[in-house]
Image (cartoon, rainbow, N blue to C red):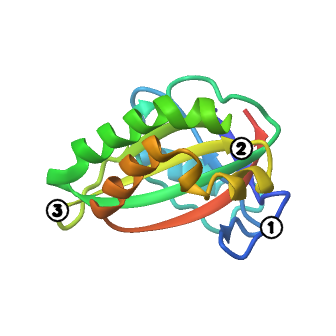
Amino acid sequence: MYALWGPAAEQDDRWTEIAQDRIAVMLSWAQVDTELLTMELEALAGASQVDTSLWEASLRGDEPLPTGQGFYTHSFRRTRIEDADQWLSLSEESWVTSEPYWENEVVGVWRDLEEEGGLVHFLRIAWYRDLQHWIDTRDITQEPISAEKWVIRSTLEVDGAQSSASLLER
């Protein structure tokens, strides 16, 4: 198991929260039969709904999670297939200056293996000490080198959504 996520300890209306009666399970292994996995998860006591999808680590993501404590953001972004490599490149370049400045950590970026309509779906998970720490990082004028890359990266995004979560188990 890579991680088990539940509702965030700190709630904020800027986020789509994991519902109190739901969990998100991230498993990591080289090959998986999604139909078998879905059947096994549905057999768990109390599981009323199981959604499965396959993602591959594009940046980091195969490394251990930084800590069990803190505020994790799950940012879902879609780009056109032709913009995916540049989006990833800008992300990675921005971390060189943003992580030391803000003292946060991008856990990884994963790419959904099912592409739809010429779009790539990415999931970026990042760690912050707490909700206020995340709020502080929204002031991109504080660290303009990364901000410039984030602005360019955002022009490559078709759409996106964010949620926050607490790490229950790793």
Q: Is residue 24 left or right of residue 122?
A: right
Q: Which mark is residue 118?
A: 3
As drawn, 96 above or below 133: above
* Label 2: element kind: strand
Residue shown at 48% from the left, 35% from the top:
95
Instruction: Judge depth for marks 2 and 3 and give the one in front.
Output: 2
Give the amino acid type for the residue marked by disc 1 in the picture.
Gln
* 2 or 1: tag closer to the N-terminus: 1
Q: Which mark is residue 11?
A: 1
**Residue wearing tag 2:** 128
Give the amino acid type for the residue marked by disc 2 in the picture.
Tyr
Q: Position of residue 151 (x, y in %)?
A: 38, 57
Q: Position of residue 150 (x, y in %)?
A: 41, 52
* 3 or 1: tag closer to the N-terminus: 1
Q: Are marks 2 and 1 in contact (CB under 8 Å)?
A: no
* Label 3: element kind: loop
Give the amino acid type for the residue marked by disc 3 in the picture.
Gly
- CA–CA distance between discs 2 and 3? 32 Å
- CA–CA distance between discs 3 and 1? 34 Å
Q: Is residue 81 left or right of residue 5?
A: left
Q: Quadrant of the C terminus?
A: top right
Q: Are marks 3 and 1 in contact (CB under 8 Å)?
A: no
Instruction: Judge depth for marks 3 and 1 and give the one in front.
Output: 1
Q: Looking at the image, which is closer to me, 18 or 37?
A: 18
Q: Looking at the image, which is closer to me, 19 or 119?
A: 119
Residue 35 in sight in this render: no
* 2 or 3: tag closer to the N-terminus: 3
